[in-house]
Amino acid sequence: MTLLRNDPTTQLAFSVYENKGVFAVLLGSGLSRSAEIPTGWEITLDLVRRVALTKGVEDQSDWTKWYRDETGQEPNYSTLLEEIATSPAERRAILHRYIEPDEDDREEGRKIPTEAHHAIASLVRSGHIRVIITTNFDRLMENALREQGIEPTVVSSADALAGAEPLTHSRCYLLKLHGDYKDSRILNTDQELSSYPDSYNKLLDRIFDEHGLIICGWSGEWDHALRAAFLRAPNRRYPVYWAARGKLGGGATELAEHRDAKTVAVNGADEFFRSLQQRVETLEQSQRQNPLSVELLVSSAKRYLAKSEYRIQLDELFTQEFERLLIQLRDDQLSPQGRYDPEQFRFRVALYEALTEPLARMVGVLGRWGDGSELPLALDIIGGLHRRAVNIRSGSRVWIGLSAYPAVLVFTAYAVALTRSQRWSSLHALLDAPLSREYGKTENLVSTLFLQAWGEPREDVWKQLEGFENRRCPLSDHLFDVLSVWKSSFIGVSSEFNLTFDRFETLATLAYFERYSEEDMEKAIVSKPDAVFAGMPIGRAVYHDDSAMTLINDLQLDETIVALLNAGFARNSRRYLELFVENFKRYVGSSRWW
């Protein structure tokens, strides 16, 4: 017996995970059934009932039998619609009441996206699914995608196809074969479903040829044009999986045999797609660092750091983890090639953080409990990660810039840990350390990797992170969130981590300010008596009055001034520190007008 012999869902999950973006999804009316949007057969019987009641017929326990006795025929969705409504616009109006949720529907959770819709949207967000084909008129799939922050390219008519974004350029391509229920051009009757426009046929031929297929909720019995497109598919380069309750019907069996489809027995669309999405997510996570191994690395770093006789083991531990990270950063998912996309940006940020976390937390240990002798090791790691990014010369500007994010993460973790230990001399040495940039240029570290001084991705790009649309310092806020999770490894007991983080950013801003001469700043403050007189990267503290005032007061205490000047901050000048504090105050004041 093979490992996956009786588990086609796991087999499909592996295929979807390993062939990212290759599979398309074909959805039929069964997918919307759990949202209590009726199927075509249920609409047919309800139309029979309504027509009969209008004619004065008493309510029947079996409307199918009544119709058969009355007409000598089986109830037929297409025939009824043609009899009741002679135009597409009239048919659209009839269908509207079956699909559009009213207040009661929304309160009771009817006619809204189901678990299946949300699971598919999650697979789209992670980049595993890009193409969705549906025979449904409703907008449940679009609504689920938009809840995930994805704006799909929706094609619901030949006209829409002509003006749509090309398939290869779309983050999510949604083809609504039968149209949209708010558009009078919907396809309902047998005659309307007997053939598609040539442009639809060409698109379907391409999708069926170039993609694997996951089918759910479609019987395969009706829609002759879709059946014909399925049978036209020239090859089987990618597999087809057909999810169904029980055995496939005769029409579906013919199609499944034609494409050698694998049948997946399911209890329902919700369970199937939820299970598929969870298994793909598990495979994604399994490629990342095991949390237990992260804790083991951090514990090893603490143990080796505690005794000088373990300095060789300490160096080897960091060397191995650094080299492991460099190998993982070569992942094709982090290639600098490809068009910028907000969803891809969010994915890459999360992946960079997952890969960098072990090393960043280990370097945080050095900052918290080191004695200064570890600074060259920390600088070697940060410099090595940055050099790797600098050597990438071609590709998307955002992706190239983002490749330095691991260096930013390690630098931030080390600097925050130094701040927690009040190791001001090591902190200033870190911030002022030379770092190579493009074309042999050199700048100090704070002018290369700190907030807005990093330069790319730009500050507004970080607003693409979920929930960060209105943040005024999105990168600063996000780094704070990340370090709030990692801090357990190197911060220790601290009830005011937010103040520790804000103090790090303020001192880093001071180190950046040191690029200006004291003489120039004296002139600048005179020329701009009521405004910010020198540009510098600012963090979240500027927008939090409590933190800002605490830090400003602290920077004016004699004890703090002496400690910072002795560590090399503010060009060893009290007056220079006063100039910085005044400029910082003006940033705080100007932020209140936002």
Image: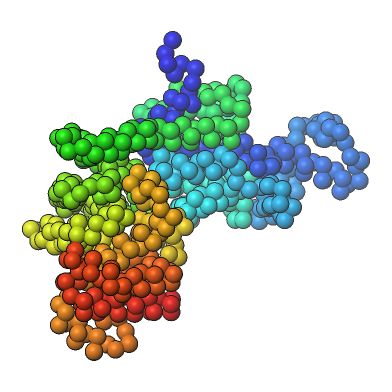
Residue at coordinates 71% horizontally, 52% vertically from top-left?
Answer: 107
Q: Residue furthest front?
A: 559
In-front residue for pair 561/212 = 561
Please indicate, yes or no, whether residue 474 appears anywhere in the rendered image. Answer: no
Q: Residue 40's spot in the image, x, y percent?
A: 68, 39
Image quadrant occupied by the N terminus:
top left
Coloration of the structure image: rainbow
Q: Which residue ends up furthest to the top in the rendered image?
A: 1
Above or below, 77 against 424 in this view is: above
Quadrant for the C terminus, please.
bottom left
260 on left or right of 56: left
Q: Position of residue 535 (x, y in %)?
A: 25, 75
Residue found at x 63% / y 44%: 188
Please tell me which residue lies in front, 135 or 454: 454
Image spot of residue 255 (x, y percent): 51, 26
Foreground residue, 438 or 353?
353
Residue 281 lies, with reference to residue 166, above or below; the image says above
Residue at horizontal 60 percent and vertical 21 percent from the top: 247
Query: Is residue 469 toward the left or the right of residue 390 in the image?
Result: right
Residue 567 is left or right of residue 504, and the answer is left
Q: Quadrant of residue 50?
A: top right
Task: Tell me residue 114's x, y (percent).
Answer: 60, 42
Name the quadrant containing residue 425.
Answer: bottom left
Identified at 70% across, 37% down, the residue is 41
